[in-house]
Image (cartoon, coloured by chain):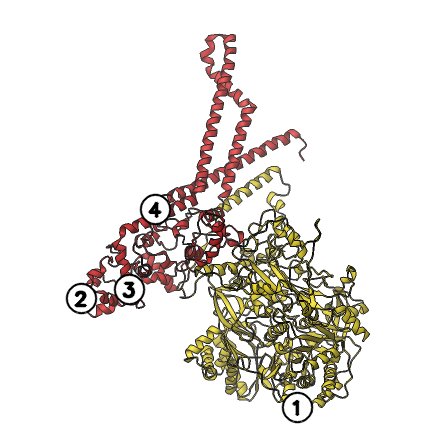
Chain colours: A yellow, B red
Amino acid sequence: MENTTKRYWKGVEELRNDSEFVKNANSEFANVNSEEDLLGKDPQRRDFLKAMGFGMAAVSLAACEAPVRKAIPYLNKPEFTFPSISDYYASTYAENGDYAPVLVETREGRPIKIEGNPASSITKGGTTARVQASVLSLYDIDKLKGPKRGETDVKWEVADREIINQLNTVAGRGGAIRIITGTIISPSTKAVVADFVAKYPTARHIQYDVNSVSGLIQANQISFGQAVVPSYRFDNAQTIVSIGADFLGTWVAPLDFALPYAQGRKVGATKKDMSRHYQFETIMSMTGSNADYRGTYKPSQEGLVVASLYNKVAAKLGGASIAGVTATEVQYLDKAAADLVASRGRALVVSGSNDPNVQIVVNALNSLLGSYGSTIDLGTPLNYRQGNDGQMNAFINEAKAGTVQAVMFFGANPVYDHPRGAELADALPKMALSLSFADRADETASLCKYITPAPHYLECWGDAEPKRGFYSITQPAITHIYKTRQFQTSLLTWAGRPNDFQAYLKNYWRTNLYSQASGAGSFDQFWIQTLNDGVFEPNKGATAASSASFNAGTLGVAGSAIAQRYRPTNNIELALYETVGVGTGALANNPWLQELPDPVTKACWDNYATISQKTAKEKGWEQGDMVSVSVDGKAAIEVPVLIQPGQADNTIGVAIGYGREKAGRSANTVGKNAYPFVSITNGYINLSAVNAKVEGASGRREIAQTQTHETVMGRRAVLQETTLAAYKKDKAAGSYRPKVETSEGPVTPTDITLWNGYGKPNHSWGMVIDLNSCIGCGTCIVGCNSENNIQVVGRDEVIMRREMHWMRIDRYYSSDGEEGDYKALEVASANPEVTHMPMLCQHCSNAPCETVCPVLATTHSTEGLNQMTYNRCIGTRYCANNCPYKVRRFNWFKYFDNDNFDYHFNNDLGKMVINPDVTVRSRGVIEKCSFCVQRIQEGKLTAKKERRRLLPDEVQVACAQACPTNAIVFGDMNNPESSISKVLATELESRAFHVLEEINVRPQISYLTKIRNKDEGPKQESVQESQA
Amino acid sequence: MYNNSQDKLLRMSRLSKFCGALALSLALLFNGSQTNAQDSVAAAGGGPAAATPAPASGGGDVEKGKSLFNNNCAQCHAVTEEALVGPGLKGVRQRTPGEAWLQKWIRNSSALIATGDAYAVQVFNKYNKIQMSNFPNLTDDDIKSILDYVDSANAAPAAAAVVGGGTSAATSTQTGDGGGSPSSLFTFVLVALLIVMLLVLGVLLVIVTILSKAVQPVGVTAEGTAATGASLVDRLRTGLTNTVNNSIVRSVVIWLFVLVATKAIIDGTFSVGIQQGYAPKQPIQYSHKLHAGQYKIDCNYCHTGVNKGKSATIPAANICMNCHGVIKKESPEIQKIYAAIEQNRPIEWVRVHNLPDLAYFNHAQHVNVGNIQCQTCHGEIEKMEVVEQRSSLTMGWCIDCHRKTEVNTKDNAYYDKLVALHKKETKEPLKVANIGGLECSKCHY
């Protein structure tokens, strides 16, 4: 596989690196005046004719001779692999505690797409944007190609010898050895670490999480004597209150929580009730954007909000109240308390705070509400986050003191992402042995003496236990691309044990897990079955542990600690947050994630300072103005302002995970590093700062946003929503059925038409998108990118609105403007309601794009598809102009062959991710969602080969398959057995609507009305609140 | 700048001359290439494609036996008396010691020889001591099916020939149609050119005659009959000069030339990028004529993906080794395969049939579902020493076939609904075009 990184020279001048060549290398066209060079200084007519004649003849001759193409078969073909036919392997994505059981689609031995594993009872086939994008990281050209000692390449044998020697020396003199990792959820890997520790007794394993829940674990230790993160059952909850926990986006295990949350909020013919979600937070998080009622607080109030809520509930239920806490009034807090009490036994309170005292109060609140055993299960702890802030802190103290003499980093980059990273960076060179398993020379690894790179998870063996009693297997889908070696193999080698990790893993399962399998036959049968299924869940269906006994004595201590720590300020306070895409920055060199717009701000390729409208007005800042942010006199960063409706006044939000310096071409210099502002308060990582210094700075920087309008401006034809109360009274509440005037009076638009329409005799492919289930996470976008070879265009092109995503999620804020006052309706409310609306080609049956194409490059099929034929398109863009949904994208450049777009399509390795069934579009053509026609064709062919009809739901599009909440249902509307037909059968008369129905384009995509679990409409609500 | 109008005019005329010359050269160029293509089409025409003999008597066992035979036995044995690598199988049941013996022999012949079985040793020695491959996976039923098929194939060779002939006739017609359209166009152009030239000749003759007559009386009155003989050449020259100087004649000739050249250029442009007749030299001189033609090895045996996926697949070296592990080991061409395996370097064949990336073609859809013969698109592959591209592989060629070909709906439940709907509307047969076979997204995505 080594030759996949082969470089080809365009000519000798590139090899020599001539200055002239370098100058022109980056321009798409050679920067020469062709007329002058070809024809001399003073072109004569005859010269022109000569040149033209030669050119024509040359072009004609060149066109006549086709290049010789080679066909290279296998030398020894594997029996069950056929070129052009996909194989799927069950595996597991488990990176730094993020977990997803997956199916890896491989073509001729190379992974091209990740799907969720439907056999998993945790995710049921759902994925996240990061999981979908992970396949691209496999083909990252910036990765190391083998082990390194400092700057020099070494052989594995040499590195092993030297490292073992030094480990022995350090251990011999009793020096401490530390293995620093992110959360490891693999039981066998932990066994390997234990074996290593057995060989080197001075070694210790320390896990840490960037977005830590160490405080939550500590609180459960204090309250219940169990240092765990419990399972949360969002589907069981009637009232959900989240205080600063972005549980759908970034808190603990979003993939685990999203589906049950969405299930609790789906309504339909048989289910007329849904959970009510309150969110109290500082910034507008993705989870907050899905809440029914949302209130804001400043970081300095967090503990007080939790304590006040507790006191309000305790007052009603007769629990002990917390004394000495300033009562804090936050909008809807009273209402939340009332609802929690009303739904006692089916209530759930979660907090994103990393302060154990706050979490103890949350535990007390949940105990009071009877949540344990119902919506919280302490018996099935979650393993996603195991980091211990205290241990990590102690390690850095030891490192500074010089007691740690050898350190290893795996899945950890503390120099970049730990608040004390700079101190560690100073201490590292003093250690006898420092090494990193990072796949690139990142901020930490570049300071280490050795880098022994570990491969991507798709090249690895492994396992995972995300929840107690739920296991899954990681198996390699491709051989090692570079000379890398698994972390586990390296540890076993250095521990002097047999280093075949595959055998080790199998043996571990034989000894530890095989006994839990009932009726599985021999171990080999069990093993093969598990490899096939990907998951093994002996604990599936176990009932929640009965209520836990809360240690009430700790509440008072926690209360007084809160009263001491949380004191409201008048400062501008800083809230740091993790984004849904780039996250903590570990995956920053993945251009798909960089270009994924943030679910709420719709910005990409940057981080920025979010501030509320009111604060912006007070300070006189506008969107894009640079501000300088600093905490405690640390070096300030300058970021542009982004005005964010719904953010707490007098606060500023900045995303972590940006400002990488040594991650690679897509990540370096993107955004600013906010990690230095993370602090350690009472030993726990604290992602907020109450004393931030924020000042206006000179200059402006435009933020690359994919959506710049903010409200729907009262157009009910675009977006339809209602409240649960209204829906219960009328199942068609909130639906807007437009009429058009005719000479015979108003009629529905579909009754009058110019067109004959298309028959759909065989299949009629359609989609239903449930706006109630869509949480806006953007997984579908990345899934679509991966399936359809969609190009990454970069920040500058996004600013010019030239992003290529076939699918986007429109995010709309509500407005306080009066109906008809469009100027006022343009402005979002201070604390708006948010709707996420996936928007893609609607496959109109009366498609406006088709009628304006001068070359018939876009036509209609008999299966309801709006077809786009790239080879016919001449790029007039009339279709894009005439599309009412604005979903057509134009290829302004030949992105895959242009060094200005140096992401993954411009190198041989990155091109391996291309789906061979989908054409890579060239410059000058329009493209758009095809309803994954390649999958439809493949599904039909499979049915034909087996001489049968297509099964219902046999064909799935990439977005529907990727969706973690089943918000997208795709299928054949002609088949009454398909899910889409069943949904439409009940919803056609109630919630289903077409966007812009009055223009009668008859889309194949229907949306289901968004329903908010509110008592009344938003207007009256706010009036009542202000009167109260 | 050019302010002299005459100069300008002169330059203009030069320009037109240049363009004319260019057009002419291009026309010749394209004509040349098209002639080449035509040659190959002509060579491809005629000659029935040999199809594998179809069984005369039905029965599931015989059918199964046929496919087992084709996949396992056909590369070394014929159903007739003809000896290929091993003996012809006609009458094999009668001449061998019995079916139980045959079962042992087929599953493991070397073991049988080792026991010293007289008949086994005799057969082994008679056929150059080439060891027969072992087929331990074949059940008794499988072997019985194969033998039944051998018997049935020999019992009714006449019927088989008829069926086979029918298929091949249909095949060759389709091949002719597929490649025929450019050749008929070319003939049409040739004939049209000939007619035009004859017309021009006729017009010229008429003009010459008229002019001669017009000139003659003048000569007679002025100089009398004496000068007649001498001035004949002069008169002819004058007549021709007048004709050439006649602007009508000149413009007619120029316009005809321009029209013909334009037509040739347009025709030529359509053939750009078409590699019909492309027969590159391959790294190993593999002969389909020998393997598919003479030894009648089923296409499926080597091109294993043809019923499964998009690509028919070029066989891996291990498939070659199924036979060439024992057969013709000394041939320098076969040695190349050994070398490839030893060096662990795959064989780089030259692709003959190249579709652009923007067109999606799937073999399984056509061969497995559509039951199209390989020869329909690839020509008489079993007669080709070197594989060449027989069909044009243009979109017009694809579409043409989709318009004409009936959908193979037999026993395929997928099509039931479409067939029922189609029958309601018309009595015409269900063509590929009727079920969306001409839609863009069937091939372009």
Give the image location of residue B402, x and y in percent. 47, 49
Q: Which residue does the numbered mark 1 point to in the structure image? A: A551
Type of the residue with mark 4 = Pro
Contact (CB < 8 A) between labels 3 and 1? no
* Same chain check for tags 1 and 2: no
Q: Which residue is mark 3?
A: B143
- Name the subunit of mark 1: A
Q: CA distance from mark 1 to mark 4?
A: 92 Å
Local crowd at mark 4 within 10 Å, few (<14), some, or many (≥20)? some
Quarter where residue A262 is shown: bottom right
Residue hosting label 2: B118
Q: Are marks 2 and 4 on the same chain?
A: yes
Instruction: Name the residue that disc number 4 marks.
Output: B48
- Above/below status of A856 relative to A128: above
Q: CA distance from mark 2 to mark 4?
A: 44 Å
Position of A1011 with respect to B396 (left or right) is: right
- SS assignment at label 2: helix
